[in-house]
Each structure stands twice: as structure tokens, then as C-alpha cells.
Image (cartoon, rainbow, N blue to C red):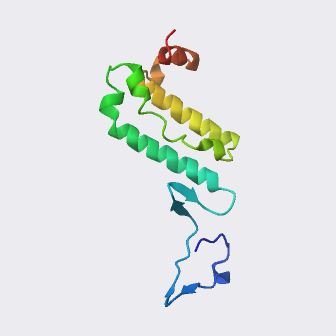
Amino acid sequence: MISNCLKRTELRPVIVGSSALKIVYAYIYLGHTIQLGRSNFEKEVNRRIKLDWAVFVKLRDIIKSKIPQCLKKSSNNACCNGFETWLLTMGLTKRLRVTQRAMERAMLLVSLRDQIRKEEIEELKFPT
């Protein structure tokens, strides 16, 4: 049973058969974090970013190698799947953009110390 009650004393256990259902405040269902309240999408975005970085680290040898960009792109950005249905704030949108740009920099073997602007990164990513 999922609940968003602030006071834990208000909750009464729900009994099915002879066992009581466990009360949770967030739940992962079909790959999405479900939580009642305002911070539902924030937790989902944070979770997706963590998962994307985990995959990125696992594929680090491929992503940071000097293979063509077209092959690297296919492994990138699973965190944004289905984001069209999310209710994003400006802060969450910025976090997704920053994460994507950090991964693109790593794929292009560009460091922040190189001080390359995002427009130049776009040109490196999609050469004309």
C-alpha cells in the first residue's frame, strides 16, 4: 500500500487474508518511481540519472575509446526515455541537460579544463 500521509499515526494497516500490507512512501513499478506528492518527478529524474551514469561507467571502455561517434551515440541517453510525460520544472530540465552535456564531453574526450563551449561540442558531435 502506498501512502503520502505525513502523520504515521493516521495510518491503519490493511489486512488481506491473514497478512497486513506493508506501507511504503515510494515504489518502483515497471521501471518508474511512483510516489504521491509533489516530488514524484524529482525522484524519478534523480533515479534515471543515477542509472544512466551506472551504465555509462560500465561502458566506459567503449565510450571513451576513439571509435566513431555514430557507434557511441547508440549507447547514450537512456535516462530520457519517456520523459515527454513527466512534469518537469526548470531545475529538473537543467539537471537533465547538464548530465547529457557531461556525458557528451566524456564521449568526445573533452575535459571541462579545455573550456570548450557547448556550441563547439555540438559541432564536434554532429560534424557538417
**Which percent across, then down, holds residue 64?**
34, 26
- The answer to whether residue 47 is above or below residue 116 is below
Q: Residue furthest top?
A: 128
Residue at 55%, 57% in the rendered image: 33
- The answer to whether residue 42 is above or below residue 19 is above
Residue 116: tell me if it is visible. Answer: no
**Which percent across, then down, holds residue 117?**
56, 18
Residue at 48%, 24% in the rendered image: 112
Nearest the camera: 35 or 74?
74
Q: Name the quadrant containing residue 72.
A: top left
Q: Residue furthest bottom?
A: 18
**Which percent across, then down, holds residue 10?**
68, 82
Is 93 placed left or right of 73 in the picture?
right
**Which percent across, then down, holds residue 66?**
32, 19
Q: How many marks?
A: 0
Residue at 54%, 18% in the rendered image: 122
Is 40 placed left or right of 108 in the picture?
right
Nearest the camera: 64 or 33?
33
Residue 70: tell me if it is visible. Answer: yes
Residue at 67%, 44% in the rendered image: 88
Q: Quadrant of the N terminus?
A: bottom right
- The answer to whether residue 117 is above or below residue 73 is above
Is 113 placed left or right of 90 in the picture?
left
Q: Name the quadrant containing residue 5.
A: bottom right
